[in-house]
Amino acid sequence: MKLLFLSHHWTNNSHHSLHSGFQRLVHYAAVEHEVTLVTWASRELDYREGPIRVITVQSGRRDFLFKRRIAISRKGAALAPAFDAVHSLYEDCTFALPANGFTTTFHVLPVVARYKEPKHRLFLFLKYHLLQRRALRNAASIACVSTNLLNAIPQQYRAKSRFIPHGVDTDFWDPALASGTPDNYILCVGAHGLDRALLTEFVYANPTRQFVIVGLKPQLDPSPNTRYLCGISDEDLRDLYAGAALLIRPLEFATANNSVLEASSMGKTTLASRIPGITDYLTEKTGIFIDTLPNRCLDNIKTLNPNLIRQTTIDSFSWQKVLSEYLTLYRQQQTSAPSSSNHIHA
């Protein structure tokens, strides 16, 4: 198929790492399909990144009233007639796309995400009223990366919505590729949705255990058993997963969670809050839920079968598996779209 993807995240502009984030779907789609991506950059250009044709629209440093995302959508709308299917990887890049002519994926909604900072709450409010409501109305198909997001979709759009999980690069996040030796530290990766108070309780309740905390700003209150890391490479993060006793993710809210998927792909046990968005990705066989540890003590915690955890992740959340579910939506677009001499079919 000839596929067009839209995203405001890409390797030249993203806070996601090269081997993590939803944009990895594009790389796996490009293995067997002709793929073009529209994103933003400091100047307009058209180039090849491996098998992927990347088209950028010019954007300044600031994204006032989502001008960057709207510019991506306008470029995508102009290109769309030449493609079998259009997928906006994030629902906020759909503003100018033709109605009923695209698939989009929702990663966040105001009733699910609970931000404390006023600027973050204002951002989410504006995004919903300016972009997300329009995406809900105009999309041919809507995918949600968690069932709590799916349940938050307004009822009139539920029939065209479904849960398709976030994926993980199980080829990269593979314990066989890691170096170093196992250690006894507890690893925490990522700040989105993190319950800082609950994480602090674990740090204080386990003074003999070292906590390695990656990507958290500002830091927790000072404690002698915490170590903070930021800006590390994917390879170094893979080694950290491999050496950890387990991953800990105390959360206030969740949809998809990259670090949980990465740790699971590495065969690691995750200790996490039993909340919607996490229970889509962890079960009693692949994770331990915090509500089973009332005293927060980790001295006697038993990790789970690493081979089972990794194989379950490969079977359920590898990008190959996730892509197969999206291909069903793309083929529906291809079938319902008007015939065109510009279309290249599978």
Image (cartoon, rainbow, N blue to C red):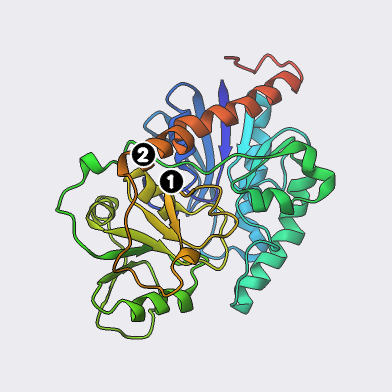
Q: CA distance from mark 2 to mark 1?
A: 8 Å
- Residue 115, above or below 105: below
Q: Amino acid at mark 2?
A: Leu
Location of mark 1 (residue): 285
Q: Is residue 190 left or right of residue 38?
A: left
Q: Which mark is residue 93?
A: none
Q: Nearer the viewer, residue 39 or 260?
A: 260
Outermost residue, right direction?
156
Q: Which mark is residue 308?
A: 2
Is label 2 in contact with label 1 (beta carbons under 8 Å)?
yes
Q: Residue at x 25, y 57 (%)?
A: 240
Residue 319: % across, % down: 45, 35
- Residue 109, above or below 143: below
Q: Nearer the viewer, residue 52 or 41?
A: 52
In this figure, what is the number of numbered marks?
2
Mark 2 crowd level (few <14, some 14–19, many ≥20, 10 Å Cα) = some
- Residue 179, above or below 83: below
Q: Which of the two labelled residues, at mark 2 and mark 1, occupies the earlier sequence position?
A: 1
Q: Residue at x 60, y 14 (%)?
A: 345
Q: Residue at x 41, y 35 (%)?
A: 314
What secondary structure is found at the residue carrying circle 2?
A: helix
What secondary structure is found at the residue carrying circle 1?
A: loop
Residue 308 in sight = yes
Mark 1 crowd level (few <14, some 14–19, many ≥20, 10 Å Cα) = few
Residue 12: % across, % down: 41, 50
Q: Amino acid at mark 1?
A: Lys
